[in-house]
Amino acid sequence: MHPALTALIAARPVPLDTWRSWWDRLEGAAQGPARDSDRAQAAALLASLATRLPDTATLAALTTSLTERSPDPGPAHPGSANIVGTGGGPATFNLSTAAALTAASMGVPVVKTGSRAYTSAAGSIDLLERLGITLTSSHTETADHLARHNIAFAGPHVYPPALTRLARLLYPLTLKPFGRFLNALGPFLATAPVTAQLTGVSATAPLSALRDLTALRDLTAHAGTHGSGRQVWLAHNTEGADELLPFADNTLHTPHTTIHLPAGSLAPDTGTLADLAPHPGDLTGHFLDALAGRAGRAATHTIALNAAALAIASGRHTHWPTAHATALAALADGAPRALAQRLRTPGKTATALTAARTTTAGDKAVAGV
């Protein structure tokens, strides 16, 4: 039994070198009985992580051991931001993707990471496929999309390749039973070349552990691990959603301060979660309407609030009321919808995209991280 697994089972810290040894073993997983043993240990290790979170140092060592194996994204694009949530909260439509497009139309360079659906009707990748918007396949392509459109939707290349090998080793078992843990950790695993990241934390995610992990990673951001230098803002609210909500009391934990945005402080506090419910029967139509401010007042102000947070985190704006007003103006003008339309690839129908999803089991599992 590998030392990483025995330490987790015994609730002992797992240092960085032990995690490195674990991924080295995974890369050399053999066929036959030895592979069966490796598969069993991998499942047991994930089950242990998903059942009981380890200490902060162990989590930090785990994320470092993974991200250091990812291709180096190079320097972060100046003033750029990412928005991604942990999932698992109340069901809403794709608010973070809408906020990303809105912020980009406001002048904020956005590199958006995301996932397939785990608890929601459709994750950001599912939505983008139906819209015909292509994910980037390399950091070079991400830079090209950013230069041309001021936004790039990053594909699986931003996630550690070790996760693909893990998924293939586990097959036919999928990563879905461990999805809640992997989604909570996912925002810290993507090597997006941004200077700031807004991470929404739902009520089902371990906020305290993620705050400790963020603080520890901030202290080691310049220790040589690529992808760890971005400033991470953690957002949560009294409704338990992983987005900022105008009708809830919101809190943002930044590397330097804590920001409180009470209900109604920037936007009208009217509205409920029902106003933000997903529309699986009209996924793309409702989403495009939302990008033009035509999905209801609560949806419009929610998108604007999250886009404003991206503008503040990136340094594009310094005053919340101005950032929020700029986001509302962009939505009223239909600029986010026009941007989404420009990003759509001609001829990529929903049918073709659905067929394209029949990739290897490992690829599909990693896309759901």
Image (tube, rainbow, N blue to C red):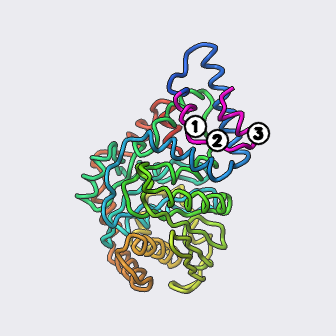
- Nearest the viewer among 110 and 292 is 110
Q: Marks 2 and 3, how far apart in space?
A: 10 Å
Q: Marks 1 and 3, how far apart in space?
A: 16 Å
Q: Is residue 27 left or right of residue 139?
A: right
Labels 2 and 1 touching (C-beta < 8 A): yes
Mark 3 Cα-neighbour bin, 10 Å: few <14, some 14–19, many ≥20 = few
Q: Marks 2 and 1, how far apart in space?
A: 7 Å
Q: Which residues are magenta?
A: 1-24
Mark 1 Cα-neighbour bin, 10 Å: few <14, some 14–19, many ≥20 = many
What residue is disc 1 on?
19
Judge whether residue 10 is colored magenta.
Answer: yes
Q: Secondary structure at mark 3?
A: loop
Please provide percent x and percent y for residue 18: 59, 36
Magenta span main SS: helix
Labels 2 and 3 touching (C-beta < 8 A): no
Kind of residue indicated by mark 3:
Ala
Answer with mark 2 or mark 1, whichever residue precedes in sequence: 2
Please provide percent x and percent y for residue 180: 64, 49
Kind of residue indicated by mark 1:
Trp
Kind of residue indicated by mark 2:
Val
**Residue in view at x 23 percent, y 58 percent:** 148
What residue is disc 2 on?
14
Give me the disc on residue 10: 3
Residue 197 location, quadrant: bottom left
Decide: is 206 above or below 317. Answer: above
Q: Secondary structure at mark 2?
A: loop
Mark 2 Cα-neighbour bin, 10 Å: few <14, some 14–19, many ≥20 = many
Rendered-image quadrant of the N terminus: top right
- Name, please, the residue furthest toward the right: 10
